[in-house]
């Protein structure tokens, strides 16, 4: 029998679990098999996250890491790649003894995805690891590969029996976005995945959910009495969710062309932020409760029309960023003939009693003025101001801003008396900063999510219904834009196309300039 609060798959109900929450959660015997191991994500995020987990003592002693790629490499060559990636990108300092232990479990299988022989070899490597390292038949298959390759790899995992578990073992598949290109392709993709793995074995990574500051939205809302009473249309005027990047395509033109800002970021990260901001209180933090509430709120989320006025898209031209001259997106190699947007903004309503009439403005873009991701809840003005007009000319609207990155924290903006003999009121801010309030540094999103995969804790992974609902929200915008001309230009280093300003001005609001 499982201990109270603990399910057989390792998921722990925090309400029933009697363990000390400060105790680290350590993964049991297992291995991770990464497809697409030579890619950017693997080198910059996955390999360093695995090392960081090892350095924090959160991986089992016999942990195994298997790379699969079309390279004529042996185990040592692959270990070298991991070593360099860790040295360059890991969060925690490099320690020889940690590396020595980790590298003992590193294996490499050369081959292409349609090569039956290579997958047969992978099968024997995995079963050898079960003997040599005691991985116990528990394996996660990480698909860090283009979605077009998913069917081939999944078919191989099914054919070789790698996707099948025996008894108490587990086999899980981890999928990186994009989860499809639109609703139809997302459904097709899901059918392909669910032919091989059951839904509880599928972990879809939206790395924003692994960020501490994103999880803090739940703590802020549901652990406090202060905010929830005003978290509704009686008090909130509108919500702005911004994910601004200062980087350009950073060598990812091949991936980005045909995808664009809306598919790359709004469909997943920003709609997840909206869901966490707008959802009702979950019964508890079980995966079912949390995902259930997100599904409800996404079902109630609707585009505001007409889309010509309530959406905007753009692409950056040459400009200045941080004192450096940068090229426009059309000068990026591989992007010359593209009509793909690098900036996207949409207006949404959440049709529930709580949010009726409160617009949610979402925007994201590359090469914007500054790197910042935030959720800004802007409150209505006080219904009455018992001051002379001249005393409050510099008073804005109250705001609560959840800083996701790089300023991790929460800022509240409110009016305060300016020192002096007159009653002049002006905006001031009150700040909570992670860096000053806590001594621990935040783990990287991938560290948290990888550990959750190995623990079988699915709360922070969107289920298929969330993915499909998000596409259903976005599809009409994508179809609308596809019929239009090219995206509107904006100079690199600015805050996007003028259409985005027109969009929000049309709703009687203005963007924050973070
Ligand atoms: C990814 C997008 O999901 O998120 C990238 O594909 C984007 O285009 C990245 O640059 C941003 O992630 P972060 O964690 O740096 O905000």
Image: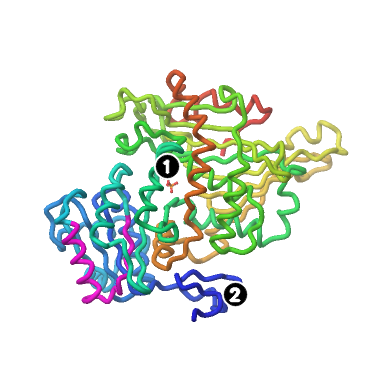
Residue at the image position 54 percent from the left and 74 percent from the top: 21
Location of mark 2 (residue):
16
Residue drawn at x 39%, y 53% as measured from the top left? 194
As drawn, the label of residue 186 is 1
Query: How many numbered circles are shown?
Result: 2
Identified at 21% across, 49% down, the residue is 113
In the rendered image, residue 134 lying in the magenta stretch gets the answer: yes
Give the secondary structure at mark 1: helix
Image side of residue 490 versus residue 296, left or right: left
Residue that extends furthest to the right in the rendered view of this protein: 386
Using the image, determine if residue 141 lies above or below residue 310. below
Q: On screen, 98 above or below 485? A: below
Q: Is residue 14 one of those drawn in magenta?
A: no
- Could you tell me how far apart the alpha carbons at marks 2 and 1 are, in whole angstroms? 36 Å
Q: Which residues are magenta?
A: 119-142
Q: Is residue 444 left or right of residue 121?
A: right
Say left or right for 243 vs 281.
left
Q: Position of residue 17 (x, y in %)?
A: 56, 75
């Amino acid at each position: 029998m499982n201990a109270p609060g603990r399910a057989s798959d390792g998921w722990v109900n925090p309400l029933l679990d009697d363990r000390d929450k400060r105790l680290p959660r350590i993964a049991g015997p297992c291995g991770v098999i990464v497809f697409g191991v030579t890619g950017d994500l693997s080198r910059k995020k996955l390999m360093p996250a695995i090392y960081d987990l090892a350095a924090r003592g959160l991986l089992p002693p016999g942990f195994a890491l298997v790379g699969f790629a079309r390279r004529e490499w042996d185990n040592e060559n692959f270990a070298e790649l991991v070593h360099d990636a860790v040295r360059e990108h890991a969060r925690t300092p490099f320690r020889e003894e940690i590396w020595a232990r980790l590298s003992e479990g590193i294996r490499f299988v050369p081959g292409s995805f349609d090569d039956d022989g290579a997958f047969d070899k992978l099968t024997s490597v995995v079963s050898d690891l079960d003997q040599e390292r005691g991985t116990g038949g528990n394996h996660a298959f990480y698909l860090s590969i283009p979605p077009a390759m998913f069917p081939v790899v999944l078919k191989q995992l099914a054919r070789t029996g790698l996707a099948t578990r025996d008894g108490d073992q587990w086999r899980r598949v981890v999928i990186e976005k994009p989860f499809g290109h639109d609703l139809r392709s997302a459904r097709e993709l899901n059918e392909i995945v669910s032919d091989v793995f059951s839904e509880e074995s599928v972990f879809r990574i939206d790395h924003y959910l692994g960020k501490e500051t994103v999880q803090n939205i739940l703590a802020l809302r549901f652990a406090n009495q202060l905010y929830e009473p005003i978290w509704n249309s009686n008090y909130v005027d509108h919500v702005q969710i911004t994910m601004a990047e200062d980087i350009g395509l950073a060598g990812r033109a091949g991936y980005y062309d045909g995808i664009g800002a809306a598919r790359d970021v709004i469909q997943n990260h920003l709609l997840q932020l909206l869901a966490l901001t707008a959802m009702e209180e979950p019964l508890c933090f079980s995966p079912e409760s949390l995902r259930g509430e997100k599904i409800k709120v996404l079902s109630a989320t609707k585009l505001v029309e007409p889309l010509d006025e309530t959406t905007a898209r753009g692409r950056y031209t040459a400009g200045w960023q941080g004192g450096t001259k940068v090229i426009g997106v059309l000068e990026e190699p591989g992007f010359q003939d593209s009509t793909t947007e690098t900036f996207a903004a949409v207006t949404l309503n959440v049709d529930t009693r709580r949010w009726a009439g409160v617009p949610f403005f979402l925007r994201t873009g590359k090469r914007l003025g500054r790197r910042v991701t935030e959720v800004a809840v802007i409150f209505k003005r006080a219904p009455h101001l018992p001051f002379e007009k001249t005393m409050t000319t510099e008073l804005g609207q109250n705001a609560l801003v959840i800083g996701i990155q790089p300023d991790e924290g929460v800022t509240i903006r409110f009016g305060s008396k300016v020192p002096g003999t007159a009653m002049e009121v002006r905006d001031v801010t009150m700040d909570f900063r992670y860096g000053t309030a806590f001594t621990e540094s935040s783990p990287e999103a991938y560290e948290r999510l990888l550990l959750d995969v190995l623990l079988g804790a699915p709360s922070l992974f969107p289920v298929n219904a969330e993915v499909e609902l998000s596409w259903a929200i976005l599809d009409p915008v994508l179809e609308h834009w596809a019929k239009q001309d090219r995206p509107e230009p904006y100079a690199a280093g600015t805050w996007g196309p003028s259409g985005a300003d027109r969009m929000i001005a049309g709703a009687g609001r203005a963007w924050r300039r973070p």
